[in-house]
Amino acid sequence: MKRAFITGITGQDGSYLAELLLAHDYEVHGLVHRPDALPGSNIGHLVGDPALLNKRLFLHNGSFEDATHLRRLISRAKPDEFYHLAGQSSPRISLDLPEATVDSVGMATLRLLEIIRDIASPTKFLYASSSEVFGSPPYSPQDELTPLNPTTPYGAAKALSQQLARIYRIAYRLPACSVILYNHESPRRSSNFVTMKIARAVARIKKGRQADLHLGSLAGQRDWGWAPDYVRGMWLMLQADPVDDFVLASGRLHSVSQLVERAFAVAGLNWQDYVKFDAALVTSVEPVASCGNPAKARRLLGWENTVPFDEMISRLVSAELDRLK
């Protein structure tokens, strides 16, 4: 039985990854920060399964600041695969909290790589990077060879971690890689992200629990995909030999206005009756619309995003409407 360790196991990607690995008969270890919140988290259904908890699913309380405790946990788990998905995840918040962002994203990755470097048997390591590392790219779509040019502390911290994984792969021959993730959504996405902010607002407006929706610019464009597909791509990356960096993206751009129009249409509403512009929500540093080129992942991993944009938005809104029943 293979063993895997996941940081950020209660997040959107971590929870889908835990389900995928358990379905492939892995023993799964996860780092958690608030054990008391587990029943209501994205892995609540796994935690509540007595056939899994402390049998094939093991959860460990800890934080990235305590390197000694992390070393002890990882040394005991002896994972074959390590998925580092945790860390501050908002480019906007990073502009207000740059130090905290760089520490939780960049320094945490360095600590983990140092710990894994000392494990006797080689552990495959995957770092979840972001399209934010490209910031204002010189061309589109971007691929694995596109120069890094971040425009936020978040993007810079992600770029640091991505480069560290590459350096450890070359200098120490550690099987470490980075997945460059473009926006990927699901009903488990945090409401801090515009997709879920919109989907939840649409559901609440439909049910008469909210009057309108305040948004910044609707002109922004993103490359949006379906989160479970991207998690499957992460797993495929660590099954490859040798491991390498990959871009996971849909390869298609859509605007926030398209997202809004589609989301309200799912609920049978006219978005123009409810959406209000709020200048305070316009980001001071807006990166150029980034679109990923997943050709390498398609060619070498057989991977692709399987859920089209309109279907993805329909699933998000439908899930929120069901949640309010």
Image (cartoon, grey):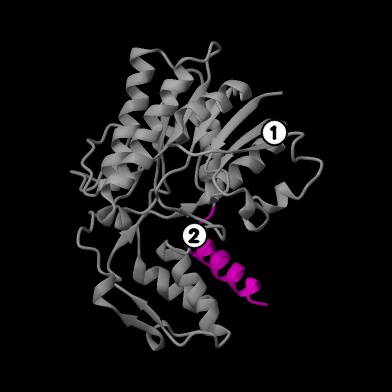
Q: Quadrant of the N terminus?
A: top right
Alpha carbon distance from label 1 to label 2: 27 Å
Disc number placed over residue 190 in the picture, else none: 2
Mark with earlier residue (1, 2): 1
Bin the neighbour count of mark 1 within 10 Å (Cα to Cα): few under 14, some 14-19, many 20 and up: few
Is residue 299 a member of the stretch shown in magenta? no
Q: Which mark is residue 24?
A: 1
Q: Position of residue 194 (x, y in %)?
A: 40, 65
Q: Give the residue at the far right of this rendering.
A: 51
Question: In which quadrant will I find the C terminus?
Answer: bottom right
Q: Nearer the viewer, residue 168 or 94?
A: 94
Q: Secondary structure at mark 2?
A: loop
Quarter of the rendering containing residue 109: top left
Q: Main secondary structure of the magenta part?
A: helix
Left/right placement of residue 19 relative to residue 69 reads: right
Q: Residue at x 43, y 23 (%)?
A: 176
Image: magenta residue range:
307-325
The percent coordinates of residue 125 (x first, y second) are 48, 26
Q: Relative to 95, does residue 239 appear above or below in the rendering?
A: above
- SS at mark 1? loop
> Disc 2 marks which amino acid?
Ser
Q: Is residue 142 visible?
A: no
Residue at image x 45%, y 69%?
197
Residue in the foreground of this view, choosing between 266 and 85: 85
